[in-house]
Image (tube, helix red, strand yellow):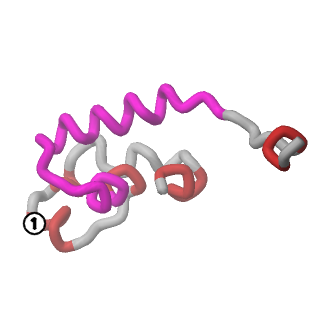
Amino acid sequence: MDDNVRNPKTKIEAKDQVVKLLEVVRDTKHLYKSKEIIFTLIGRVNAMIKAHRTDTQPFFGSGKSLKNGIGWR
């Protein structure tokens, strides 16, 4: 037996997170790379997000509830 059989990782249902991620990609019109998408989800502002005024949109920071964005990495 290998280590993965003896100590399996706990699985989580990620359907809601995937739907939220795809909605943010759609709402930003496929403008950003993955780093900016994650920043948009966790509510962190950088120059590109500020320049496109994404920080004023209702979906900005919609993924904060997932333990400070740790789950989005």
Provide residue 72's location: percent of width, then percent of height: 47, 51
Q: Nearer the viewer, residue 19 or 58?
A: 19
Q: Is residue 8 magenta?
A: no
Q: Is residue 53 left or right of residue 18?
A: left
Image coordinates for residue 27, horizontal then vertical, percent: 18, 37
Residue lying farthest front? 1
Percent from the top left, x then y, of residue 8?
80, 40
Instruction: Residue lying at the far bottom in this picture: please name it.
Output: 47
Q: Secondary structure at mark 1?
A: helix
The x and y percentages for residue 22 are 30, 34
Question: 4 or 11, which is in the foreground?
Answer: 4
Instruction: Place residue 62 in its image quadrant.
Output: top left
Q: Is residue 14 above or below residue 25?
A: above
**Magenta stretch containing residue 32, yes or no?**
yes
Q: Image point 29% across, 55% down: which residue?
A: 34
Q: Nearer the viewer, residue 10 or 48?
A: 10
Residue 30 located left or right of residue 70: left
Residue drawn at (30%, 49%), measured in percent from left and top? 60
Q: Residue at point 35% right, 39% down?
A: 21
Disc 1 marks which amino acid?
Ala
6 displayed left or right of 21: right
Query: How many numbered circles are shown?
Result: 1
Does the magenta stretch mainly form a helix, a strand or a loop?
A: helix
The quadrant holding residue 35 is: bottom left
Instruction: Name the quadrant of the N terminus.
Output: top right
At a point 28% along the width and 33% down the height, the residue shown is 23
Q: Which residue is mark 1?
A: 51
- Dot 1: within a 10 Å radius of its alpha carbon, few (fewer than 14), some, or many (20 or more) residues? few
Which span of residues is magenta-colored? 12-39
